[in-house]
Image: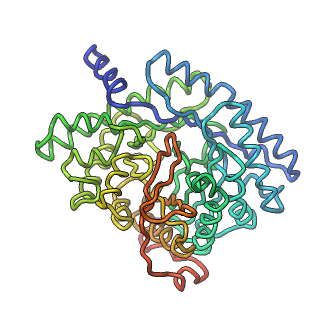
């Protein structure tokens, strides 16, 4: 039974500590829309999204009002478009028409973002994959709500270095296409290793082919709640620290479970998963970096940061899995730079570098996220950073990702401004030494020996 103390405690989390449900994401399969005629394909995609998702936003608002729980985003993820558009699209321009259709459908139903303008290329690229990837810069420059992802590696298949090499130039081109908006196109593009089929968070969300026709996935968030809880046990032992994080993660996840169940029932769509990730925002007090400071490091990036993050990530998962039978997505702690005021402060204090961020991704949920680098960073260096992060995911059997913004016309110390949840980011330095001879080799890096588990 829920007692009055727990009700009061949850209210305080919402009112004072930035507890929210970050997103209700409705996954929609577009496999039934496949056609070899482009006009027919676009019509079917628009009709299916606007039919299945017509009540998503209104249901989300109703749940917010009835339960008093803020739901920041209502989103849609769809089947990777390279699979859906392969029969009809003969050029990159053809794929751009689908991006526009997705954008129009998202605006029609009122969702914040739609993800799934994606290609799954961990072992190789089909012609459709390559056409979609080459269309990404234009697609992101002419749409407002479309997010794109490319899966370039997995533990089972290795790293598709041909895709990694291509993505270096695609990211640079995406930056140039949106140079007038601080290269914002890159904030909607991510390269992944071991991407889950049920991730509700953008820009990496897509509706995997293993999923049902439609499904509700919910992402919760509560860095402020965890930080407040830890401030009450300052200086205590690691045992007490861990117990406090677990108990707090349990409470946060129960809120997500409640919202997911209600949304599933009201939309008559199966419940998929709750993603436990601690997802920060630029709001003061809603920072993963500030949790690390509360644990005991002066700034994120100081010695001990990776150990503190490993502890946090593990305890969040241990607490969260007790609160829901269906935990999935990424689940852990995000460390984006632009979306976390504490991380921004650490960069501005020179406490953290790109290399330290890479080390931290070995123990957290995702990867190098929302990091601005100089606009003149070579394509091959961007590909090298991607390759490094793909290797971490492949060898450690975890999801990793790269979302870099090579800000056109900007140099180290400048800032890029995106606003909203994307926030702003100081431009960070990139190692000046080259890796072109490595990146320009053809083929793929083989899967590690521990991939053979059949």
Q: Is residue 395 shown left or right of residue 299?
A: right
Q: Position of residue 109 (x, y in %)?
A: 69, 30
Q: Position of residue 438 (x, y in %)?
A: 52, 83
110 over 84 or under it: above or below: above
Residue at (78%, 58%) from the top-left corner?
Answer: 86
Q: Is residue 279 shown left or right of residue 407?
A: left
Q: Position of residue 60 (x, y in %)?
A: 56, 25
Residue at (38%, 42%) from the top-left corner?
Answer: 278
Tell me where residue 131 sits by quadrant: bottom right
Q: Identify the residue at the far bottom of this view.
A: 437
Q: Position of residue 364 (x, y in %)?
A: 36, 54
Whether residue 158 is visible to the viewer of this picture, yes or no, is no
Residue at (44%, 23%) from the top-left corner?
Answer: 69
Residue at (38%, 33%) from the top-left corner?
Answer: 253
209 over 18 or under it: above or below: below
Number of numbered labels in the structure image: 0
114, 197: nearer the viewer? 114
Image quadrant for the N terminus?
Answer: top left
Q: Is residue 247 shown left or right of residue 38?
A: left
Whether residue 250 is visible to the viewer of this picture, yes or no, is yes
Q: Is residue 294 shown left or right of residue 349?
A: left
Here the colouring is rainbow
């Amino acid at each position: 039974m829920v007692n009055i103390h727990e009700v009061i405690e949850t209210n305080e989390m919402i009112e004072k500590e930035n507890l929210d449900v970050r997103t209700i994401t409705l996954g929609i399969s577009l496999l039934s829309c496949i056609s070899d005629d482009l006009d027919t394909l676009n019509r079917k995609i628009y009709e299916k999204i606007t039919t299945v998702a017509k009540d998503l936003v209104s249901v989300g608002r109703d749940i917010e009002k009835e339960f008093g729980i803020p739901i920041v985003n209502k989103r849609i993820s769809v089947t990777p478009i390279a699979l859906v558009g392969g029969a009809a699209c003969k050029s990159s321009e053809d794929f751009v028409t689908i991006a526009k259709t997705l954008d129009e459908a998202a605006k029609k139903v009122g969702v914040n973002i739609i993800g799934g303008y994606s290609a799954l290329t961990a072992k190789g690229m089909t012609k459709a994959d390559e056409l979609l990837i080459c269309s990404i810069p234009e697609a992101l420059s002419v749409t407002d709500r479309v997010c794109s992802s490319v899966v370039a590696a997995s533990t089972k298949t290795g790293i598709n270095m041909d895709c990694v090499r291509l993505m270096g130039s695609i990211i640079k081109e995406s930056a140039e296409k949106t140079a007038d908006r601080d290269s914002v196109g890159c904030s909607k593009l991510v390269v992944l290793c071991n991407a889950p089929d049920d991730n509700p968070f953008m820009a990496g969300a897509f509706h995997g082919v293993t999923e049902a026709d439609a499904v509700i996935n919910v992402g919760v968030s509560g860095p402020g709640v965890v930080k407040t809880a830890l401030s009450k046990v300052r200086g205590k032992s690691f045992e007490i620290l861990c117990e406090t994080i677990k108990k707090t993660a349990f409470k946060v996840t129960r809120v997500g479970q409640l919202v997911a169940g209600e949304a599933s029932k009201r939309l008559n769509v199966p419940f998929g998963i709750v993603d436990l990730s601690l997802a920060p925002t630029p709001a003061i007090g809603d920072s993963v970096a500030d949790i690390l400071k509360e644990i005991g490091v002066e700034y994120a990036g100081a010695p001990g940061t990776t150990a503190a993050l490993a502890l946090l990530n593990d305890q969040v998962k241990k607490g969260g899995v007790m609160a829901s039978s269906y935990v999935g997505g990424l689940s852990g702690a995000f460390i984006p730079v632009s979306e976390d005021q504490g991380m921004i402060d650490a960069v501005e204090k020179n406490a953290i570098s790109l290399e330290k961020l890479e080390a931290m991704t070995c123990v957290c949920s995702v990867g190098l996220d929302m990091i601005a680098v100089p606009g003149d960073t070579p394509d091959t260096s961007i590909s090298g950073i991607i390759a490094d992060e793909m290797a971490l995911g492949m060898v450690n059997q975890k999801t990793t990702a790269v979302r870099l913004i090579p800000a056109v016309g900007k140099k180290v110390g400048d800032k890029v401004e995106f606003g909203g949840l994307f926030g702003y980011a100081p431009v960070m330095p990139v190692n000046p030494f080259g890796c072109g001879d490595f990146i320009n080799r053809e083929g793929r890096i083989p899967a590690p020996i521990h991939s053979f588990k059949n």
